C-alpha cells in the first residue's frame, strides 16, 4: 500500500481519529510514522479545514512535540494523512498498565508536556485530547505529545459527538458544552499527573454517566493519600489543575511547568518543598535539569 510517496509497511496503532502506520519515505530513505484519517476529511469544506489545521500543527516546535514532516490527501484513495517522525517507544497508557510512575519522573514528564502545551497555546492551538495514549515515551526516556488538534477536527468533520476524546480525561466545561480554552488542556493534564503518581484515575467510574458526574461534582482525595512520598506542593499543583472553575487553574501551561520542574529534582527524603521558579531566568535551568533527569532515568 502507498499513500502519497510513502510506502506503508505495517499498521502499528488504531485510535479514535485514525490509524497510524510505520512507513518508508523513499525520497529521503528514512522510516516515518503516517497517520491515516477517515475519507470524510477529504470532502468539501472539511478538506480545507484539515489542511489548515495540519499547517498550524506543523509550525509547532518543541522537544516534547512529535515533529510533523509532511501532510496531504492521497488523490487515488482520498485518504488524508500526516507524516511524523518515527520513534521507538510505547504510549504512556501501556506503561501505566504496569503501575504508577516514580514521582520525580512523573513531574519531569508532566513538566515537559506542560511546556509543550504552552508553545501550542501561544500559537492558538488547543490539544483537546490530552491523555496517556497521546503521550509517547521513547526508548531513551523522553516524552512526546501527539495528536494536536485532532479531537476537535474530528468532532467538527465526521459528525461525531461533540464530546470528542476519552471520557476519563474530559474537563467540566467539555461535559457541559461550554467553550474550551488552554486551561481545559491543563485539567486533562492534571488527571494524567494524578494517575501517574497514584496509579489511579481521580474520576474513575463504570459508566459514562458516572464519570461525568464525578468530574462535575466530586473532589478526589489528594495524591499524597495514595502515595505518602508525595509532598504537599504536588497536592496543590494537582488540586489547582482539577479546579472545576477554569479561572482557578494555572494561568498558563508554562506556569504549571515551572512548578513541576523543581519537584522533578526532589527526592522522597527531602524535607523542604521547593518553591516554583520565578521570572529571574531560573526556569530554563530547572527545565534543563529535568530533561537530564529524563534521559538518565
Image (cartoon, rainbow, N blue to C red):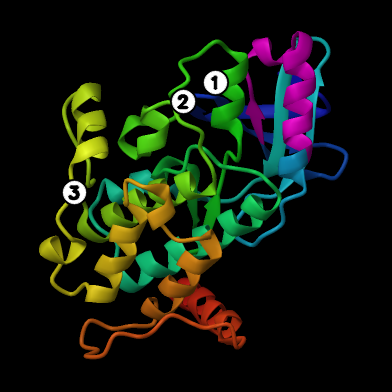
Residue 118 is one of the magenta-drawn residues: no
Quarter of the figure with residue 232: bottom left
Q: Which residues are magenta?
A: 34-55
The answer to whether the residue labelled 1 contacts the one labelled 2, judged by CB atoms less than 8 Å apart, is: yes
Q: Left or right: 222 with respect to 249?
A: left
Label ID, residue 16: none
| Residue drawn at 39 percent across, 82 percent down | 265
User: Would you name the residue on which mark 2 appears?
Assistant: 164
Residue 164 drawn at (x, y percent)? 46, 25
Q: Earlier in the sequence, mark 1 or mark 2?
A: 1
How busy is the neighbourhood of tag 1: few (under 14 within 10 Å), some, or many (20 plus)?
some
State the residue position of label 1: 155
Q: Residue at x 24, y 58 (%)?
A: 100
Closest to the observer, 97 or 128: 128
Identity of the residue drawn at 18% across and 27% down: 210
Of tags 1 and 3, the one toward the viewer is 3
Q: What SS does tag 3 mark? A: loop
Query: Can residue 231 be seen?
Result: no
Closer to the chain start, of discs 3 and 2, is 2
Residue 129 place in picture, x, y as percent: 48, 37
In the displayed structure, would residue 235 be above or below residue 167? Answer: below
Q: Nearer the viewer, residue 297 or 183?
A: 183
Judge left or right: residue 284 versus residue 212: right
Is 239 or 205 nearer to us in this picture?
239
Q: Position of residue 200 (x, y in %)?
A: 20, 49
Q: Secondary structure at mark 1?
A: helix
Query: Is most of the magenta stretch helix, strand or loop?
Result: helix
For disc 3, the marked residue is 219
Q: In this image, 274 relative to 1: left or right?
A: left
Crowdedness near tag 3: few (<14), some (14–19) or many (≥20) residues, C-alpha within 10 Å: some
Asked whether the viewer can see residue 156, the reply is: yes
Amino acid at each position: 500500500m502507498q499513500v502519497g510517496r510513502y510506502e506503508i509497511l505495517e499498521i502499528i496503532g488504531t485510535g479514535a481519529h485514525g490509524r497510524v502506520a510505520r512507513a518508508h519515505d523513499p525520497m529521503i530513505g528514512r522510516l516515518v510514522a503516517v497517520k491515516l484519517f477517515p475519507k470524510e476529511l477529504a470532502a468539501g469544506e472539511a478538506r480545507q479545514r484539515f489542511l489548515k489545521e495540519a499547517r498550524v500543527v506543523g509550525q509547532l516546535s518543541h522537544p516534547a512535540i512529535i515533529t510533523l514532516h509532511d501532510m496531504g490527501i492521497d488523490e487515488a484513495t482520498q485518504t488524508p494523512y500526516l507524516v511524523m517522525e518515527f520513534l521507538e517507544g510505547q504510549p504512556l497508557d501501556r506503561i501505566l498498565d504496569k503501575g504508577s510512575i516514580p514521582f520525580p519522573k512523573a513531574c519531569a514528564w508532566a513538566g515537559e508536556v506542560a511546556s509543550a502545551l504552552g508553545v501550542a497555546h501561544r500559537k492558538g492551538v488547543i490539544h483537546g485530547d490530552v491523555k496517556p495514549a497521546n503521550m509517547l515515551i521513547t526508548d531513551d526516556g523522553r516524552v512526546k505529545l501527539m495528536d494536536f488538534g485532532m479531537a476537535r477536527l474530528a468532532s467538527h468533520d465526521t459528525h461525531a459527538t461533540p464530546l470528542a476524546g476519552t471520557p476519563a480525561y474530559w474537563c467540566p466545561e467539555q461535559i457541559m458544552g461550554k467553550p474550551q480554552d488552554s486551561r481545559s488542556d491543563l485539567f486533562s493534564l492534571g488527571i494524567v499527573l494524578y494517575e501517574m503518581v497514584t496509579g489511579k484515575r481521580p474520576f474513575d467510574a463504570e459508566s459514562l454517566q458516572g464519570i461525568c458526574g464525578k468530574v462535575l461534582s466530586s473532589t478526589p482525595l489528594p495524591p499524597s493519600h495514595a502515595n505518602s512520598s508525595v509532598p504537599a506542593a504536588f497536592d496543590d499543583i494537582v488540586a489547582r489543575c482539577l479546579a472545576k472553575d477554569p479561572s482557578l487553574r494555572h494561568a498558563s501551561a508554562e506556569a504549571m511547568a515551572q512548578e513541576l520542574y523543581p519537584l522533578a529534582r526532589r527526592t522522597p527524603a527531602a524535607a523542604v518543598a521547593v518553591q516554583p521558579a520565578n521570572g529571574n531566568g531560573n526556569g530554563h535551568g530547572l527545565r534543563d535539569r529535568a530533561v537530564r533527569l529524563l534521559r538518565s532515568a
